[in-house]
Amino acid sequence: MSDCKVVLHGTLIDGTGADPVADSVLVIREGCVEHVGRAVDVSVPRDAEIIDAAGKTVMPGMIEGHAHVGGDYAGQQVLRLSLQRGITTVATVSGNPPGCQLRDAIEAGQVRGCSRLVVGSIVTPTHGHVKFRTADGPWEVRKAVREMVAAGSDFIKTAASGGFWGEDEVCAVRNYTYEELEALADEAHAWGLPVAVHVHTQPGLNNAIRAGLDMIHHGAFIDDEALEGLKERDLYYVPTLRVTCQKNIDAWPDRPWMKAEMEQASPIHRAGVRKAHKMGIKLAVGSDYPGSAHVWKIGDATPWELMELVQCGLSPMEAIVAGTRNTAEALQILEQVGTLEPGKRADLIVLEGNPLDDIGVLYQQENILIVLKDGVVESTDEEHKRHYKVREQQPEGRPQ
């Protein structure tokens, strides 16, 4: 079997925001993108396996920037179903050391058929919104961060405010103080790790922004002062709009306190994202999935988030860039994934329909025809195997 594949004649969206390339060619060798461009300009290697994508869209795999995936068998199942939905990389904000072990097993090929995993480990105050390694006071926080670094974490997750979930909390309650957040950020950055912070309201928003935490997640009650701080500090905003969408609000009739605060937040959340977009604040994609199992199928939440961003004023191209390139940059993995450029890992999907005309085509699983991760076909049903079968080898030359 050849180690070279060519995805041929599709309309290419490369994830950078550049104009799509009609009748494209993408050459993959040893799991990485070797060449990309117009079919008339790139020679097809003689030993290549050809995947004919004529009439289809080719784009980077989606990247989920805020999921809850553990290191157990259930986590593996979530990652397998996510990969089938075209989500080739998942960042878990609660993976912790067991998640690091699963990530390493996936990378070593010991666990197969799973999305790439980027692991966040939690450092939290006593009685904080998120739970794992409890640490109070700047020096204890620094020690906790060092422990998570030693465990192999890709980033640190913390909290600066309360959340919707607990009956004994509200979003406005403060979690870490500014001094603790400053110590956490400084220590994580000293080890080269970014920080994602759960935060909905003031004073947590200003504390997190002033401390220089890299990714502000949620911001359901974000205000103008916080938006100005995000812009000034050039930080990423990961709004997780799915959390406050009506479909999700209706999913929790047995949690009236949660539903009430979500309903209050929903219009504020969306107004904040619209302002963030107009201000040029960097937006990345996270959906806080899996979510309620009787409402959300695994993998639905990420494309739903792209649809939410379009409703908040992003163009479909901007939403795709947010869910590919930008999320990779926020997670500090852009050198590997996020765009279809030479040298990057060949994580991509072949898609029925054009998401630039209707971003909603990404939400329908039947439109995800073929998924490649590291240049390997990971998902395609029998119908598409017949229709997109690998063509016979051909002499090297220009595609016809």
Image (cartoon, helix red, strand yellow):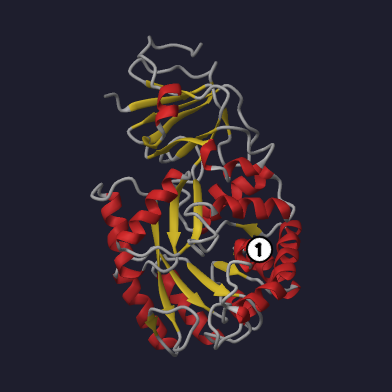
Amino acid type for the residue under numbered disc 1: Cys
Residue 268 at x, y = what percent?
A: 74, 70
Q: Residue at x 37, y 66 (%)?
A: 95
Q: Which residue is mark 1?
A: 245
Q: Quadrant of residue 149?
A: bottom left
Please, is residue 220 above or below residue 43 in the view? below
Please, is residue 378 above or below residue 115 in the view? above
**Residue 222 in sight in this render:** no
Q: Residue at x 75, y 65 (%)?
A: 271
**Residue 373 in sight in this render:** yes
Please, is residue 387 above or below residue 347 in the view? above
* SS at badge 1: loop
Residue 20 at x, y = what percent?
A: 63, 32
Residue at the far left in the pictured view? 110
Mark 1 surroundings within 10 Å by alpha-carbon count, few (fewer than 14), some (14 through 19), many (20 or more):
many
Q: Is residue 102 left or right of residue 210?
A: left
Residue 75 at x, y = what percent?
A: 36, 60
The quadrant in which the N terminus is found is: top left
Q: Nearer the viewer, residue 249 or 128?
A: 249
Q: Quadrant of residue 201?
A: bottom right
Numbered circles on residues, count: 1
Q: Residue at x 42, y 79 (%)?
A: 131
